[in-house]
Amino acid sequence: MEPVAPRSHNTMPMLDQFRSNHPETSKIEGVSSLDTALKVFWNNQREQLGNFAGQTHLPLSRVRKILKSDPEVKKISCDVPALFSKACEYFILEVTLRAWMHTQSCTRETIRRCDIFQAVKNSGTYDFLIDRVPFGPHCVTHQGVQPPAEMILPDMNVPIDMDQIEEENMMEERSVGFDLNCDLQ
C-alpha cells in the first residue's frame, strides 16, 4: 500500500498558482509595504462586494450554530449568518495578509504562529486579541532572543538494569567514606 502523500511539507505545493489565481491575492503581488497591501486588499474587497450574491466560504449552518450557542440569542434572521460569515471571511483574510507580510519580511514562505501574533500585535484594530493568540517559545528568535540550548538526553528506549545501578551506588558509598573521630578544626 502506497502512502497518500509521498512526501510531507509545510508549504502549499502550488503556492505560485494560488497567488496568481486567487482574487484576494492576485492584485497584492509585488507590494512591499503593509499599508499599500492593505489599501489594495480593501479596494479589491469593495469591488467584489458589488458582485456579492450571498455565497460565502464558511458554512452558514455552522455560523448559525455558533450564533445560537449564546443563551441570550433567541432568534436569528435569515440574512444574519451570511453577513456574519462574510465579516469572518474579511477578518481571516486581513489577519492572514498581515501575517503573510510579516512572513515575507522574515524571508520565509510559511506562515507561522509567531507571524499571526505579530500581525495581531502590530495592528491597532486587532490588538485586543493579543492575549488570545498563543505565542510559544519556538518563536523567540524573531524577537532577537536566542532560545536556550537543548540538552541531549540518552536514548530512553534502552532497558535499564536497576540491580547494576544499585551495585554501582553501593560501591561509590563505600569508597567515599569518612571518619567520625576526626577533628574538623
Image (tube, grey):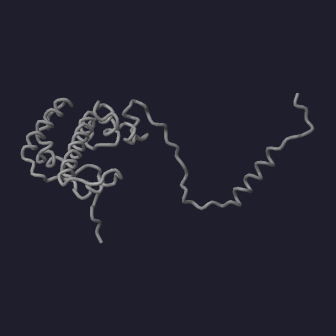
Residue farthest bottom in this picture: 1
Residue 39: horizontal and vertical position, in percent? 15, 32
Answer above or below: position of 16 versus 185: below
Task: Report the side of 151 relative to 166 (left or right).
Answer: left
Residue 157: horizontal and vertical position, in percent? 54, 59
Q: Please count the marks in the image.
A: 0
Which sits in the foreground, 64 or 145? 64
Which sits in the foreground, 43 or 60? 60
User: Residue at left 88%, top 40%?
Assistant: 179
Which sits in the foreground, 68 or 86? 68
Task: Report the side of 72 relative to 163 (left or right).
Answer: left
Residue farthest right in this picture: 181
User: Residue at left 42%, top 41%?
Assistant: 136
User: Residue at left 32%, top 43%?
Assistant: 112
What is the quadrant of the N terminus in the image?
Answer: bottom left
Task: Report the side of 23 relative to 173 (left or right).
Answer: left
- In which quadrant of the rendered view does residue 162 lie? bottom right
Residue farthest top in this picture: 185
Answer above or below: position of 110 versus 128: below
Task: Report the side of 106 relative to 140 (left or right).
Answer: left
Residue 143: horizontal and vertical position, in percent? 38, 31
Which sits in the foreground, 166 or 11? 11
- In which quadrant of the rendered view does residue 113 lie? top left
What is the quadrant of the C terminus in the image?
Answer: top right
Residue 123: horizontal and vertical position, in percent? 28, 32
